[in-house]
Image (cartoon, rainbow, N blue to C red):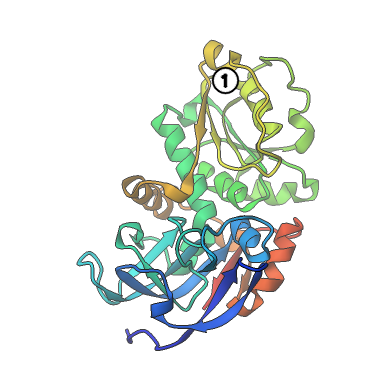
Amino acid sequence: MSAPAAAFRAFRIHTEGGHRAGIETITLDDLTPGEVVVKAAYSSVNFKDALAGTGQGKILRKPSLVGGIDLAGHVVASSDPRFKEGDAVLCTGSGLSETRDGGYSEYVRLEADWTIPLPAGLSLREAMVLGTAGFTAGLSLLRMEHNGQSPDQGPVVVTGATGGVGMLALDLLTRAGYEAHAISGKADQADFLRALGAREVFPRDTLDAARRPLENARWAGAIDNVGDPALAALTRVIQPYGNIASCGLAGGPGLATTVMPFIIRGVSLLGIASAGTARAQREQVWERLAGPWKPAHLDTICTRETTLDCLPEVFPAMMAGASFGRTVVRY
């Protein structure tokens, strides 16, 4: 493994004096501090990246940062004894493109505590097909199981099923032995969702009729990517002592429900904050994603491979809802 280049390319975002973003030539000294220097091999594109890259969301907490909340690559230098030159590693969330320079760079400097060794069973590319989306889906199931969820309780439904988190959630739920159901507004993708493992596929308006404080219990649990109003409806139709993992707000941030599902049926609402997950739990999720929960259709879910130069073309399509599947960035 060669030493880091003196200068290299990165997709940098600036917020002062108006939004601007694009490819710049930078050096390691331009990057936020960290003990581990990684030569990036792959990254991915998430909705959060599109918000930051287009300036349509206030993601950056500093005036200028390299974008990209995910990356995978090889260590080229480390002052931390846990990592040595040549180690394959990954990082998702952990302040990337929020408080520190992110993964859209040929070289990335990371804090050692947030650098995860690539687990056996995953390639660097597969790790980024998963990325934050797969990690979020995996963390959702991990927290549900820690709270008592099991396959024998019945089916688990995934809302926003044609999004990156939704697709990966269906796939890994099936791998973990669950009967997975999907709710999606894209009727033309029903066969695709079934191919990923969805036993049943329901239209988006399936939950519209669930308006009373409690409705007939329909699912044992749920992974919700939508938020308002789907999340509120889910609280009314989950079986006693089932879990709802709340990990997205594509429909809105509101939550208009009552306490009755919680105090009568014992339903649990679990918040999934993937960006700041503690290292021990982070490692647990990645070990499962590389092993018993590894989605069987990663090549199908990855529908696009792009480069740093093409990111400005990818972001607007994602913001407009025109993207489908996972996009991997290749260096």
- Which residue is located at x 68 percent, y 64 percent? 54
What residue sits right under mark 1 in the picture? Answer: 239
Q: Is residue 166 at least partly visible in the picture?
A: yes
Left or right position of 234 against 102: right
Residue projecting furthest to the top: 264
Please tell me whether residue 165 is drawn above or below residue 63 in the rendered image. Answer: above
Please tell me whether residue 200 is drawn above or below residue 43 in the rendered image. Answer: above
Q: Amino acid at mark 1?
A: Gln
Camera-nearest residue between 173 and 100: 100
Q: Quadrant of residue 233?
A: top right
Q: Quadrant of residue 206?
A: top right
Camera-nearest residue between 235 and 242: 235
Left or right position of 10 against 279: right
Camera-nearest residue between 62 and 45: 62
Report x, y in % for residue 235: 62, 24
Report x, y in % for residue 55: 67, 62
Q: How many marks?
A: 1
